[in-house]
Amino acid sequence: MKLSFEKLRPLIEGKVIVSAQAPDGHALRDTHALTAIAKACVNGGSPAIRCGGYGGVEDIASISNAVDVPVFGLTKEGTVGVYITPTRESVRAVAQAGAAVVCADATFRDRPDGSALADLIETAHAEGILFMADCATPEQAKAAADAGADIVSTTLAGYTEDRPKTDGPDFEALEQTRKLIGPDVFLIGEGRFSSPADAAKGLELGANAIIVGTAITDPGWITAHFQAGVVNES
């Protein structure tokens, strides 16, 4: 599904988007299982699905064919440095697998193919899809918006050396990002959002939409969360 940002925006504005991913070794690291989860999340009202990760283009293609909402696609190539859709070729692969939006690392670190962020954005637009910048700091989000990213997000806040990992969403990073980028850039809050209250607060602090993954799609995490709650109550 390819669509302009003008058509995408009203679909996702003010809503929770679900991320359906599972790493290698996880019980749900199965394309068929994640496709079923994505379909269930769409049935529950998710206006888009973020997917791919270590399942890569296979997951993106399967989910894109199974749901009637836009797919935010990414690949994860390695585990250190820039590994989220890290190269121009990665961007092309995500586009060709059927994503409407490609998500990629937008930190200031070096990419393995020597490309600049603007090169990845240009590649996405040449393929006819939109670009979402996964950022760790407000400054990176501002640079990504200036480089032409259609969407910026707080995905990597707490997952690089730029900022400490917070217990829960990095609301400070979200609020600071909105102030720095101004009111017109589309901002997504992502990273450790684990409750409806978290999502509502993220929107109040300036996010246009929120992406939630583990707290919705990982039965292992959900079970452990319930078990911990029972223990705390007893």
Image (cartoon, rainbow, N blue to C red):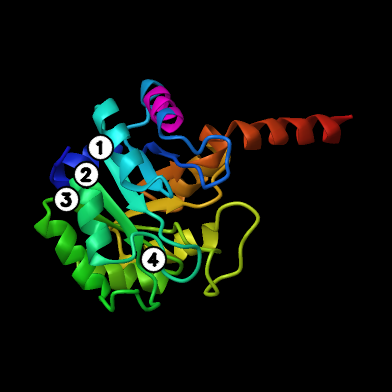
Residue 127 drawn above or below residue 55: below
* C-alpha span from label 3 to label 1: 11 Å
Q: Give the main secondary structure, helix, strand or loop, of the magenta stretch.
A: helix
What number is the disc on residue 129?
Answer: 3
Q: Are marks 3 and 2 in contact (CB under 8 Å)?
A: yes
Dividing the image into 4 quarters, which one contains the N terminus? top left
* C-alpha span from label 2 to label 1: 6 Å
Mark count: 4
Identity, as a three-letter code, of the amino acid under mark 4: Lys
Residue topped by disc 4: 179
Dividing the image into 4 quarters, which one contains the C terminus? top right
Q: Nearer the viewer, mark 4 or mark 3?
A: 3
Residue appearing at x 42%, y 44% in the figure: 210
* C-alpha span from label 4 to label 2: 28 Å
Residue topped by disc 1: 70
Residue 156 drawn above or below residue 35: below
Q: Are marks 2 and 1 in contact (CB under 8 Å)?
A: yes
- Local crowd size for mark 3, using a 10 Å CA cut-off: few (<14), some (14–19), many (≥20): many
Identity, as a three-letter code, of the amino acid under mark 2: Ala
Badge 3 or badge 1: first in the primary sequence: 1
Residue topped by disc 2: 100
* C-alpha span from label 4 to label 3: 27 Å
Q: Quick check: is 159 in the magenta stretch?
A: no
